[in-house]
Amino acid sequence: MRKILHIDMDAFYASVEQRDDPGLRGKPVVVAWRGARSVVCAASYEARKYGVRSAMPAVRAERLCPDAIFVPPDFQRYKAASRQVREIFLRHTDLVEPLSLDEAYLDVTAPKIPSPSATATAEAIRARIREETALTASAGVAPNKFLAKIASDWNKPDGVFVVKPAQVEAFLTPLPVGRIPGVGKVMEKKLAELGIATVGDLRGLAAAELERRFGSFGLRLHQRARGIDERAVEPDQPVQSISAEDTFASDLPLAALEPEIRRLAEKAWTASRKTERVGRTVVLKLKTAQFRILTRSHTPEIPPASLAQFTGIALALRGRVVLPSSTRYRLVGVGLAGFREREEALAQDDLFPTGPATRAGS
């Protein structure tokens, strides 16, 4: 039986800003550039009371919280704080799987530092983070990754929640199915049409029925409804790709996709800023109303350096779709792939200082 922690820093970017500027403490802080094209990178808990959330358009955040203090992101400081936290993790276990700058899975089945329990290890890690960084973290303790990730959100901010093996079924049964990773609004609606609102309801559907309706994802739903997740914590797995996609409530023509591409590009770009690696390839994914999947990609010699460049390439890829104009699309996704270490990417850039040529694929 594994002992897994999911540790999530509390409002990380905003908390770093409040830590470093005492004048921001206790105030609604929004980490974002102002402007119509900007999205929220993070919001303090004071701002969240007004409904401000990460990945929200900055103009909407300003409407929800007129008194918000907007602070432009400083990723170098956030990365420095993240490295401090990562070092604390590694004192307790070598099995650390970072998900982003502000969260990670840890396998503490056999911790490096003697500890009476996984819960005690989580508390020790949180105490060291608070003492050494002046930041707070929340932790979920459970037998697997899936449960630990849900649990870490239970007592936020600055809390711990434990799901013991004997408690798994009781813990999951009343949860809305939307708490299962991968179940977005569209899938939630499809499940609701089957009379499924909670994980307990989902448990009543046979695996064969879920697979018939939803393919391999249906089998994963069957497992998650029973608290099953055999994935191991995999340390030092470098980011290979980051993307954001969405399924529309009604199918759209290609000409109507620009607002959606822009919105998803913002989400993917914001997520990509949480890693120290650099993505080179821009990917556009489309799924037709007939479930045909198309991808178009483009790899410039110099990686996209701004949201505007990234979005511009994604929009240009739409022009390489040659299906009839009557084709309707049910899903669009925008992503970055081909990630490299920043130093390697910079060295590659030096080989092409003017960047006149490009590579493309599909």
Image: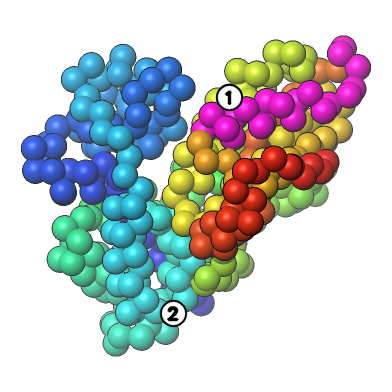
What amino acid is at disc 1?
Arg
**Residue 80 in sight from this viewpoint:** yes
Tell me the residue that label 1 is attached to: 262
Q: Nearer the viewer, residue 298 or 7?
A: 298
**Residue 250 in sight from this viewpoint:** no
Nearest-to-viewer mark from 1 and 2:
1
Please provide percent x and percent y for residue 316: 71, 26
321 magenta-colored:
yes
> Residue 94 has which mark?
2
Residue range of the region highlighted in magenta in the rendering: 307-326
Q: How many residues crowd mark 1 within 10 Å: few (<14), some (14–19), many (20+)? A: some
Please identify the quarter of the rendering in which residue 350 is found. bottom right
Q: Which element is circle 2 on?
A: loop
Task: Please tell me how many numbered marks the rendered image carries.
Answer: 2
Q: Is residue 317 above or below residue 300?
A: above
* Side of 207 where 70 appears, left or right: left
Q: Earlier in the sequence, mark 1 or mark 2?
A: 2
Inter-mark Cα distance, 1 to 2: 39 Å
Q: Split into 4 quadrants, where in the image is the C terminus?
A: top right
